[in-house]
Structures are given as structure tokens and as C-alpha cells.
Amino acid sequence: MIKPIQTLALAALMGASAMMPAMADKQRIQQVLSQMAPGAPAADIQETVVPGMYQVVLGVTVFYMTADGKHLFNGNLINLEQGVNLTEQRLEQARLDALNAIDPNSMIIFKAKGETKRQITVFTDIDCPFCKRFHNQVAKLNDAGIEVRYLAFPRSGPGTPSFTKMESVWCSANPVKAMDDAKNGLDPETKRCENPVMSHFQAAQFFNVSGTPTMIIDDGQMVPGFVPAEELIPALLQN
């Protein structure tokens, strides 16, 4: 008869043995990734429900690789029984993790009236017509209990008039008013200071933002393009 302590030791050994192939697979996949992109940070590699397939997360990018590291799949993994997009589920968490790393004090925030029911973070460009349309409905969003946090994404890039305008808005003594004025077509007074516009611009690239406005909802969903308040408010508040 095997003694209880021996039983525990045997169970631990069997568990460790089961983990070893997975650890070897992860190491193999990481080695392949390091060869593909030297200097890239270590990826988060996890087993999936599909035998022999691993989920790889790099920043806010999710893809899949086979255990032997020879095949890469880029697309959505969907649980058909539950109707759940497992890839988007993981992406949402990755976006939230990355968003939480950005200092809220670097954002221009239009606070909700009364209780804050939802929060959206918006990559915006002063010279973007659809960004101006979005900003015209921020008051409605605030009245509905939705906080709007702006990050700068001057699409034209550093050294351009749009980039300089955004720096001036962030350097203003009253950035909220300066943003209001700029969205209403008033060029901000040129200001210079230490500002987060470049770091926001880089964050937009990290999030794979390709246009403005682009919203990141407080549950990690990313919504590109302009959405009318009449659609956005009920969509946010029904959850």
C-alpha cells in the first residue's frame, strides 16, 4: 500500500511530467519568435483549447502557432458552442492592460455629469472632420454618464501643423477649453511645454490605430470611426 505522502509525491511528479511538454513547446515557440523579430519582448504564450495550438500575445496583437513552431495562424479563434470569440476576448484584456499603463493625467478628460456609468478613451486628431463631429456630441455623452478621455493622435505625424496644434492644446493653461476651441475651428495659441503628444502618438501605433476617431471602451473593445451618440449611448449603457 502506498503511503499518503508517497501518493502526494507521485501526483506532483505526474503533474510536473504533464507540464514539461507544454513548457518545451512554449520555449520552442519563443525561440522561433526571437529569430523572426530579434529584440522583441518575450511573448505571452498559452495553450488553447485546440490540441497542439498555442495563443501568442505580443502587445495588443494576438495570433496562434503550432507546438512545433512551424506554422502561424492569424485570425479569430471562435468557440462555436458558446458563440465566444476567444481571440477578441484576449485582445480586450491586452488593450486594457496597455491602456492602464498610460497615465490618466496625460489625457484631456471630459467628465461625466453625476455618476460615471461608462468610460471611453478616444484617439483624436484636431484636424479630423469626423473627430469634430464626435466632439460635438461629447456633452450628450457626459450628460448620459459617459466620461470621455482624449489621447492625441495627429495622423500627419511629428513636425506637422496638426502635431504642433495638439501640443499647444495640451500645453494650454486650460486644456479642456483649448480642446473645445480647437474642435470648433479656432487655432490654439502656440504653446511649448513638456507634453505627452509624442507618447500618445506612439501609443496609437502600438494599438494599431489607423484612423480617427478610434475609441477604446472600458471593457477593452476597440471601435474605429465615428459613431452617433444616438447609437453609442444605448450601446454603452445596455451592458
Image (tube, rainbow, N blue to C red):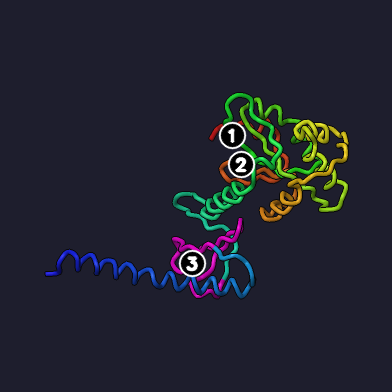
User: Dot 2: what SS?
Assistant: strand
Q: Residues within 10 Å of mark 2 (few under 14, many from 20)?
A: some
Which residue in the rendered view is the most extreme toward the front? 193
Q: Which residue is rendered at x = 73% and y = 40% of the image?
A: 226
Disc 2 and disc 1 in contact, CB within 8 angstroms = yes
Q: Give the range drawn in magenta.
A: 44-71
Query: Does the magenta portion include 64?
Result: yes
Q: In the rendering, which numbered label is found on residue 53? A: 3
Number of residue marks: 3
Q: Which of 173 and 30 is in front in this view?
A: 173
Q: Nearer the viewer, mark 2 or mark 3?
A: 2
Look at the picture and state if 203 lies above or below 7: above
Query: What percent of the width, then of the height, locates residue 106?
Result: 69, 42
Query: What percent of the width, then of the height, locates residue 178?
Result: 80, 34
User: Dot 3: what SS?
Assistant: strand
Look at the picture and state if 19 lies above or below 122: below
C-alpha distance separating marks 3 and 1: 36 Å
- For residue 73, which quarter of the picture? bottom right
Look at the picture and state if 149 lies above or below 59: above
Q: In the rendering, which numbered label is found on residue 193? A: none
The reply, left or right, for residue 139 in relation to residue 50 is: right
Q: Name the residue under label 1.
A: 118
Type of amino acid under label 2: Ile
Q: Residues within 10 Å of mark 1 (few under 14, many from 20)?
A: many
Query: Does the magenta portion include 149?
Result: no
User: Dot 1: what SS?
Assistant: strand
- For residue 231, which quarter of the picture? top right
Q: Name the residue under label 2.
A: 217
Type of amino acid under label 3: Met
Q: Which residue is rendered at x = 80% and y = 44% of the image?
A: 193
